[in-house]
């Protein structure tokens, strides 16, 4: 079967390849990918090549399909999995798996398995580890975004506080406490705000900072102070470049400090600010993944000893985290559409991935069967003056507050040029 996919051949070498998929084995499953959202982790793998811990040394000879935030439809099921999975079922993929202790995951290392592809062959370890999930939600893009949301769910579960002299741990953020998300108006920050307000356990105070005022204003439009108040949360948006950020953050907390501080940008000064903001028994979560293997920042170990300050970090979420994210989306409690600012086709993946930090906005959503340049949702209306596809998409997004949505997805899949 002839297939098109974006594969990594080496450092800064992403190509839209056309190649033959091998015959399906009895212990494999063939899937058709519909959507895949581009992750910053894919950018890091692309620019680092074999220096990246998840990219194998033989990538030049055996290029790996990139992308892992995928959703689609099962097409064929090998004999081993008959009765457990069936053609026509929708799926998502939990790519944070253990492949024989190598650290290799789908989206980084495998010739025939990944997200930025028309079709993929799922090898048996994926099913054995419960990483092929049946998707019972609505739009495909929501299924794709359940993977990054699972990373947020996992991070929140990794938080902990102590009791009984520090000998017992209570996992999760402190209910009713003070919480800050530093550098939190990007796509993952928006997901974290959404989960904070609608995921279950809530703080009493949530402060979100970002030095990009455009992103901060957009976050405030999507997750309003009024909506947060209805959930029992005092929500404050703050641009730290416009004032003495640490003093302002302390004043907002009533000079008490913060129980939970999440760092969503890999900058040493932000990590150190987060450390300084912790109150007694506070927990700092370093969520941002740096590209510098020697990245470091100062941490006050006096307070780690005497004030019970904690430091945690997570990379990815587990299967249970992804199942929770999908359940919250299906219930209508989480709406990940706000994370998306751009939409494109499979042809847009190489350039978009390699330029990801330079492209403003949030998540870049890819439809793998479509030929479409990466396009900002905010540009749909202007482009619609000369392109009927964008005119229709602009109207559909306008109905949903300017956000991507299931109607727009269905229209795009029905009317866009096939790749």
Image: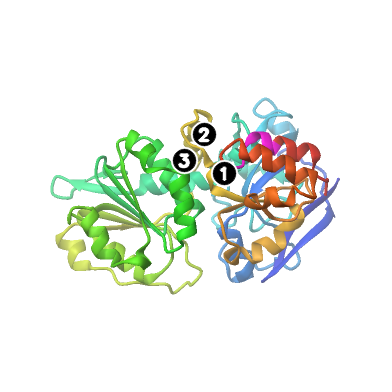
The single residue placed furthest to the bottom in the displayed view is 294
The single residue placed furthest to the top in the displayed view is 83
Q: Which residue is the site of mark 2? A: 329
Horizontal arrangement in the rendering, residue 122 relative to residue 191 (left or right): right
Circles 2 and 1, Cβ within 8 Å, touching? The answer is yes
Query: Which circle's residue, 3 or 2, is located before the other in the chain?
Result: 3
Q: Secondary structure at mark 1?
A: helix
Question: Dot 3: within a 10 Å radius of its alpha carbon, few (fewer than 14), some, or many (20 or more) residues?
Answer: many
Q: Which residue is the site of mark 3? A: 321
Residue 114 is situated, as x and y percent measured from the top left of the image, at 68, 51
Q: Residue 7, located in which quarter of the rendered image?
A: bottom right
Question: Dot 2: within a 10 Å radius of its alpha carbon, few (fewer than 14), some, or many (20 or more) residues?
Answer: many
7 and 363: which one is in front? 363
In front of the other: label 3 or label 2?
Answer: 2
Start and end of the magenta stretch?
A: 403-409
The residues bearing labels 1 and 3 have C-alpha atoms spaced at a distance of 13 Å
Whether the magenta-drawn stretch holds residue 259 is answered as: no
Residue 232 visible within the image: yes
């Amino acid at each position: 079967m002839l297939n098109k996919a974006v594969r990594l051949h080496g450092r800064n070498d992403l190509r839209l390849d056309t190649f033959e998929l091998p015959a399906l084995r009895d212990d494999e499953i063939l899937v058709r990918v519909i959507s895949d959202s581009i992750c910053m982790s894919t950018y890091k793998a692309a620019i680092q090549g074999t220096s990246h811990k998840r990219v194998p040394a033989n990538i030049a000879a055996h290029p790996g399909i990139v992308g892992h935030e995928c959703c689609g439809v099962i097409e064929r099921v090998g004999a081993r999995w008959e009765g457990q999975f069936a053609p026509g079922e929708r799926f998502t993929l939990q790519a944070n798996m253990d492949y024989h202790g190598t650290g290799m995951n789908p989206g980084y290392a495998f010739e025939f398995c990944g997200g930025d592809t028309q079709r993929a062959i799922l090898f048996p370890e994926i099913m054995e580890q419960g990483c092929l999930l049946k998707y019972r939600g609505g739009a495909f893009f929501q299924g794709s975004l359940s993977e990054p949301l699972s990373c947020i769910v996992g991070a929140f579960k990794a938080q902990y506080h102590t009791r009984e002299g520090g000998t017992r741990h209570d996992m999760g953020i402190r209910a009713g406490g003070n919480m800050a998300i530093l550098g939190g108006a990007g796509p993952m920050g928006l997901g974290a705000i959404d989960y904070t307000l609608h995921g279950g356990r809530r703080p009493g105070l949530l402060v979100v900072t970002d030095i990009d005022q455009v992103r901060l204003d957009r976050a405030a439009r999507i997750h309003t102070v009024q909506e947060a108040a209805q959930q029992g949360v005092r929500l404050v948006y703050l641009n730290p470049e416009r004032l003495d950020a640490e003093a302002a953050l302390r004043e907002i907390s009533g000079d008490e400090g913060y129980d939970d501080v999440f760092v969503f940008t890999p900058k040493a000064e932000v990590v150190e600010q987060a450390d300084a903001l912790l109150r007694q028994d506070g927990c700092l979560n370093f969520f941002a993944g740096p590209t510098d293997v020697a990245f470091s920042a100062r941490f006050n170990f006096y307070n780690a000893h005497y004030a019970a300050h904690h430091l945690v970090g997570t990379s990815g979420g587990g299967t249970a985290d992804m199942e929770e994210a999908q359940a919250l989306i299906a219930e209508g409690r989480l709406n990940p559409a706000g994370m998306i600012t751009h939409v494109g086709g499979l042809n847009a993946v190489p350039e978009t991935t390699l330029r990801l930090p330079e492209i403003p906005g949030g998540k870049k959503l890819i439809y793998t069967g479509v030929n479409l340049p990466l396009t900002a949702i905010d540009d749909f209306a202007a482009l619609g003056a000369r392109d009927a596809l964008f005119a229709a998409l602009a109207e559909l997004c306008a109905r949903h507050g300017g956000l991507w949505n299931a109607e727009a997805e269905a229209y795009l899949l029905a009317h866009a040029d096939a790749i």
